Amino acid sequence: MKRIGGLLLFLLLSLSLQAQEKDCAVIVSHTETFRLTSPVSGEHTVDKTILVNHEDGLDAATLVIYQDSFRSLASFSGEVTSLQGSGKPLKLKEKDLVVLALSSGLADDGKTASYTPQGRYPMLVHYVYKIHYRKGIASFPAFTPIESEKVKLAEASFTVDVPEGFPIKDYSHMVSREVSTEKGRTLYRWTVKDFPAVVEEDMMPSYLELLPYVLASPMSIDYGGYQGDQSNWKGVGSWLYSMQENVQELPPHFVSELRKITEGCKSDLEKLEVLYAYLRENTRYVSIQLGIGGLRPMPAEEVHKMGFGDCKGLSNYLRCMLAAVDVPSDYYIIGTDRPNLVPGYASINQMNHAMLAVPMPQLQDTVWVECTNPSYPLGYRHSGAAGHEVVLVQPDGGKMVRIPSYPDSLSRIIQVADVTLAEDGSARLSLSRELWLDEMEPYLGFQNLSDNAKARALTSGMKLHADAIKVESIRNNFNDYRTLGRNFVPVIGIDYSMSTRVYANVNRERIFVPVNPVAMSIPVQKSGRVNPLVNEGGGIIENRVVLHIPDGYTIESMPKDVNLDTQWGRFQSHISVEGNNITIVQIIHAYRFEAPAQSYEDYKTFARAVNKAYSSSLVLRKCLSLQDNEG
Amino acid sequence: MKSLKVITGVCALFLAGAVSAWSQSIPVNTKIGKISYTEAEMLSYSLDTSAVALVLCEDRNIVLDIDSYLRITKTTYVHERIKILKEEGKSYADYKIPYYRGDDPEIVNEIKVSTYNVVNGVIQETKLARKYIFNEKATSNLGFISFSAPEVKVGSVIEVSYKIESPRYWEIGDIVFQRSIPVNFVEVKFDYVNFFYFNKMARGFLKPTSSFSGEGRTMPLAGYQSYNYTLNKEVYSLKDAPALKNESYSFCPSQYRAAISYELSSISIPGQVVKNYSLRWENVDDTFRDSPVLKRCHDNNKHFEGYAKAVQGIEDEKEVIAAVRNAVLKDIKWDEKRGMVPQELSKSYKEGIANAASINAVVASALNHLGYTTSPVLIKRRSSGFLASFYVSTEAFDTFILQVKTPSGQVYYLDAATKNGYVNVLPIDFLVANARLLPIDKSAASWVDLSSLERNMQNVVVTAKLQEDGLVSGDVKVTAYNETAYSAKSYYARFSSDDEVIEDMEKDDDVEILSLTHDFSYSPEAVIQYSFEQENVESGEFLYIKPFVTTFHSESSFRNPTREIPIEFPYKENITYQYTLEIPEGYVVDQLPASSRLGSSAMNSQAQIVSVETDPHHVTIRFTYRNNSILISQDKYQDVRAYWEQICNLYKSTIVLRKI
């Protein structure tokens, strides 16, 4: 691209000036083409121009190209031009890209080539690059022209160019599609124009609902030497299963050992419990994603020998152990980041994890086992799985099912405190915290934490300095699945005590006592709401405080009871008095909801009322007769 | 002719070494593979029952070797044995060993990894297969050897050994004895030919035992007669070293771990080679004088004439400095990187963007052109650890700022790149006690103290009025000076809009902020103004009003009951908060917060609250806080914690009004 001509410069500057405050960047043009050159190879070409108005829009112009053993960067060029000043472009070459091959796990064959432009704003950035695909194509590149907030799109297009008659499937959102044929090739083309910027806010819908994108892939798959059919989940499952043929053997002496340690078990559940405990004690999660190993599990024999594996390896390992003791199970794949798969579109790229499903007919249930973290209680469907659509990988193909979810009301935190308050504002506290369902997940490893780490976890968010924190007991109901089956809800309870020098503020004859020093306020947005409000999961937080006040004090002021019942949730705050004992109960039951942006003011009213109740105080005053005596 | 390795005995010494370390809590035989039942069966560590893992033993041998062709290599032999005590500790079985892979790369080899578990009363070894040792080529210069020990469970003993061969003999760096998990026994041997001379510095709260000896050797030099020399042997060991974890209010927590730093100061082979690196600070100064650091601070450019015209008429010297800085930043944008070596001035102007070193060089050159004598000041940032003036090192510094001597003789300091600073207002990470001034006229360098250049103050004035509906509304004006202004500007820079700032400010308070403006121009001040509304509690005849609309200390600071490392405050500061409430007819004051004074000798700090009913319709609450300390020893932590708690309690004070 030559130095920007005067007219073009004027137009771009105008574009910049016209951009609203939220348009930190504008995608001026974005063209992608994927040309299939053979069933296992192709070329992906990208040509994009981004106008960055402000530092907050820099993400839109930051380039990250991912490569691995199946795809590599073939060519790259670019230009960065500051529209202030001379307008002379800085030309970019491949050597200007920062190449990093550092895995987040133990090892993988991926590397990234990235570039972050620098310059004065507004700044025009242009990239052109090509990526070669080889050894297999599981899906065509996903087309996501907008990937961050405050980025407006002027125009973008994506073309998949395949031989005529080559079947593909696709799913698109907020784009228009056309199909044409020329010179023995079929061209599928999607376009989108003038798409406004999205603003990120709390409790907003998923980006998948707000942004344009295209997913496309071949109907048949030939990847890393494994062929299959990808037209539906049955085909995807068959293809995955074909990769698992030689990974299901265990050493014979180990099989004998498994049979020995389970021979006293009276049910499949008992066998699963024994082997799950074995998994916990003898294995750990280590991620190794090399080549086809990114999809194919590590052989069970290797996992056994090394004592580690990733989610695929560990799930396959447990499957093999169960099979050795005649307990059937299904390896399944899941996307833990979203509950619903794209409707009518089956592709391996929607999945990021593998687990194991073990049918328990005697309990009329299925146990969905998380093999990478065997501290989860058996029978519990964790927050990354409950309610999710998943695909069982079975010998006769894939089968889509949905893991049952839990009612929101079972997600609870219950905190009970018995507080003995002294005249100087100090207090001794005896507390109990119960965490139900997903709320207990952060506490699974609590028992193994150091005393300091336990204290930090328990006092996090408290508005006081705690001393002499002592955990009295930790309890759970993790064995209850045996009797409760699918009605099982895991609970962790922690009883602890502490003291604090400053629980209440003392001023002469008055003591100002916080009603709820452990409550976390609900954040409220100041700027005008743009997106609809979405709360994807409700729950209950219950705080009960029994406060024993010192002799000789009366209650001068007490917050009024609060009772709110709205579309956002229910909130109750109630204080009762009996002699020197004051009982404060505050319960919030947050609902799941979807509401338009205009209703945010109503939500704010609810949140503010709750926050006010949480931060209110009781005022105690020394009785006059005692004061006179002391005066 | 074959090259002869000088030190041939060391390898054998290392491999055969069966050092028995018996005086620490857990007796260990440090020979590879010699795991005792005590080590294998133990389930917790008596000196620290909360430890998730324990280093049973670590021995390291660093060998500086020279051959008959005077080629120098550094070989490091590493052996460590770790006991996994809890689930959390299993992550200590994962290794990523960094190595340099640029020109003259390092080689990591002879890697052996084993895990020992007790199975049916027998200690069983599982070795890691070679195919599970990975070589990651992260960048063109940096690689990692990654592996994970096999069969790791709670109770396992992991043993790892490897060798690193490196041509980078000048990098000995830090020998660290203490970690974030306890260390039962560690021994480090450093063997080097007496041609090498080092500066050494020990740090941390623990002192390793040490021994020094020498061994006579002979080396044939290529083409020359044999040469007699001494092999110096330095041995350090430490036992029962407790874990030292990171804590808040510390710029560089790792600097408190027991360690010894080595800096190569010279190589001297009699009759052959003499090369000095950093015998004294003057040698380090010379290195920088010969580098672009000094040269480019005294350069010329056509833009300077324009700057000279722009500052004509400005009398205040500080403003002249600021004006030149602003003019340069208009022409050259900062790329948010620091750097140590500035590029050519013409390149910075041509590209329109540069790192901080280059921008400082341009500003220095421009100021020197105007007759303001400007010199670089080399800094080791607080986040990199303290700089000890007795430990000479060429690697001591990681950036530089400027000292400006005005025509009238005033001396100021400036980091031109950062927009939140000003003349004598530096980034908080740069407020160090020892910085190295390198005068532009090449006269002798000296140490300067940047820790307290100006008075840092914050004045908050609140004018509030009780409305008829029981709400309190009012205005707040915050004026921050110097480093406090820097902090305020940096805080705002975290957010992309004023609305986001307000959301953060309202998070923990009962106050609703209605409007917000600020003046963050390039100056030593920051001014923030906002209006607010506050709900109060009314109960019968009483009305309770919280006079602290904003607070200055967080309850979450110093929450931990104990502390192992010193506390570092960002800077000394004074805060004044004055709140005036106008009370309408129909109310009288029933109670004001008690006037009180708090103090902490540990912190050299005082706080005070004074409540006054100035007339029947006005009350004033005045809070002042002064902190005169930056560094406080950890044995004073309980004092600091208690004092902090009391200050946070003051913020909960309440004015009680009564209806009449």
Image (spheres, grey):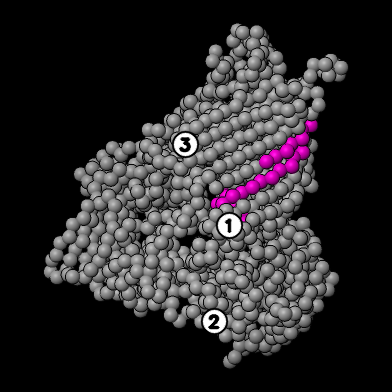
Q: Earlier in the sequence, mark 3 or mark 2?
A: 2
The residue labelled by disc 1 is A484
Which quarter of the rendered picture does the N terminus of chain B lie within? bottom right
Out of A67 and A1, give the one closest to the viewer.
A67
Q: Residue B487 placed where, x, y %?
A: 57, 38
For the residues beneath circles 1 and 2, the answer to whether they share a chain is yes
Where B112 falls versus B326 (above or below)? below
Q: Earlier in the sequence, mark 1 or mark 2?
A: 2
Badge 1 sits on which subunit? Answer: A
Badge 2 sits on which subunit? Answer: A
The residue labelled by disc 3 is A568
Q: Secondary structure at mark 2?
A: loop
Contact between marks 3 and 2 (CB within 8 A): the answer is no
Left or right of A83 in this view: B225: right
Residue ID at (60%, 79%): A259
Mark 3–mark 1 Cα distance, whole angstroms, equals: 32 Å
Q: Of tags 3 and 1, which is closer to the observer?
A: 1
Q: Residue B411 placed where, x, y %?
A: 60, 38
The residue labelled by disc 2 is A250
Please give the label number shown on residue B619.
none
Residue A417 is one of the magenta-drawn residues: yes
Q: Residues within 10 Å of mark 2 (few under 14, many from 20)?
A: some
Task: Tell me the kind of residue under disc 1.
Answer: Leu
Q: Secondary structure at mark 1?
A: helix
Residue ID at (72%, 68%): B55
